[in-house]
Image: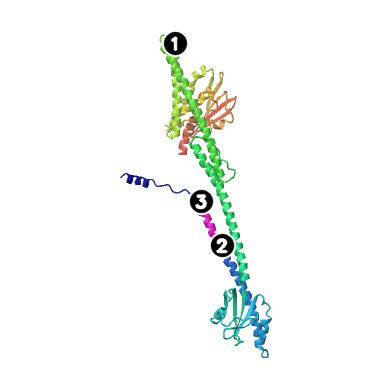
Amino acid sequence: MIKFKHQNLKNLNPDPPKRKTITQRWLTNHFAVIVLIMLTFSLILIYAVQSFYYSSARQTLTGELTSVVNLLSRYAQDSETNLYSEMRSTFESFSAKDQMELMAVNSKGWVILTSSGFSPSSDTAIPDYENLLAGGDGYWIGKAENQEKIMAVCMDISAFSSEYPAVRVVCSLTELDRNIHLMIIFVIVICTIVILLLVLTGIYFIGSIVKPIRQLSTTADRFAKGDFSFRIRYHNSDEIGDLCNAINHMADELSTAEEMKNEFISSVSHELRTPLTAIKGWAETICMAENDPETVRKGMNVIVNETARLSRMVEELLDFSRMQNGHFTLQKATMDVLAELGDAVLIYMNKSIQEKITISYEEPEMLPFVYGDKNRIRQVFINIIDNAIKYCDTGGHVSITAQEILGNVQVRVADNGCGIKKSDLPKIKTKFYKANHTRRGSGIGLAVADEIVTAHGGTLDIISEEGKGTIVTITLPPEHAKHTKN
């Protein structure tokens, strides 16, 4: 029973399929096709070369034999000429006797007269003559009595010679076949060189692809383990180079995000610890000073303020979490921006007096209504004003204005604080990013504010110069813009 279960488990977990590399796949697929094409091409070329050489040889033999037949035909037309004597003389003086042999075949099918003076035995087969008698073209390739490969062409002259009805010419194919073999060897060598070049260039090309892919795999493993320091080195400007650059850029972004996340955790921990320490300290002081109303009053004020500060931080974190999860919702309705801006300014009036920072607010008589979530818009104003006060030194000044520009509602908050570095300005609205680590804050307030303004169809623009101050401009579309878009 145990053995049966073990076998079932083996069946449920079959061995994974054998892994084939890209090089192996190329060799078994593309390279096999290339070799097949080259082999087919070689065979076709070899056949074409052999056909060309044999056809040329046949044309040469046919041409020589035709000249002899024409000459004999003229002799036969002259009644005073002895055809046999002229034929013998023609055969003996045959100019191409070094390359081929001219023969005359009698009515019995025997070779009687030759240009070399040596006649084969009477029982020697003459396939080209037999082919001619059968109505063929009188062409034959085969082996002679000495096993030498020969080519023979035979022509009928029975029209003017009954004693010798046919003449034939025979040549050896040994030299011709040697040339063909040399050509075949040349073709094979060329094809082999081409295949080797294809293999070498293919392996090099595949290697140029496989190497960065392996680096990508290694990089992905390191990224999965949280190591974003590794970078891929690839110098070609192609699609793989673009991918490697994208991976390296992603590593830079992930590394930056990791650093920002760690800084965020550190900042939030510090921001939470400070009010908690103050609350704990003043709670202990109040317990020990129950009979001192002034101390109790001060302590309760601190506890209330720090609790409100903790509440705002927790709310920011919750909002940020909702945005990340896609659960951030807005309760939109027709709203008065001036009412929410006035409330935000009022909240920070006492705080600015305590920190000896002047707030000037020029409230207009009327602005267009906005279709939005009044609590979220007030949260944006609170975050921006809080940042302006936070980054101002003692004796600083914060200017707040609201006006209608090109039909839109525009709120402008300017301070003469420490400002933002030019290099930090493009990242200032990024989550977790803090340009100045000497100031309190979690680094997500501005990111949350930008998300809220964007969700209302508006923009949040920041202009800053280090050492001179910052200007934050919030632009919101009026209520009638909603109906226009719809």
Q: Position of residue 262 (x, y in %)?
A: 50, 29
Say what secondary structure mark 3 lies in: helix
Is residue 109 placed above or below 417 in the rendered structure?
Answer: below
Is 166 left, or right, of 299 in this rendering?
right
Q: Nearer the viewer, mark 2 or mark 3?
A: 3
What's the amino acid at mark 2?
Phe
* Contact between labelled residues 3 and 2, with CB atoms less than 8 Å apart: no
Cα gap from disc 1 to disc 2, whole angstroms: 106 Å
What's the amino acid at mark 1?
Glu
Is disc 1 surrounded by few (<14), some (14 to 19) or many (20+) residues within 10 Å? few
Q: Considering only order in the chain, which callout, 2 or 1, is on the residue closer to the N terminus?
A: 2
Residue at which label 1 appears: 294
Residue at which label 2 appears: 41
The residue sitting at 54% across, 62% down in the picture is 40
Question: Residue 24's mark?
Answer: 3
Tell me if residue 123 can be seen: yes
Cα gap from disc 1 to disc 3, whole angstroms: 86 Å
- Give the dominant element type of the magenta stretch: helix, strand or loop: helix
Say what secondary structure mark 2 lies in: helix
Q: Nearer the viewer, mark 1 or mark 3?
A: 3
**Tally of marks:** 3
Tell me if residue 342 can be seen: no
What's the amino acid at mark 3?
Gln
Towards the viewer: 379 or 286:
286
The residue sitting at 47% across, 38% down in the picture is 485
The residue range painted magenta reads 27-43
Asked whether residue 182 is drawn in magenta, I would say: no
Q: Considering only order in the chain, which callout, 3 or 2, is on the residue closer to the N terminus?
A: 3
For the N terminus, give its image quadrant.
top left
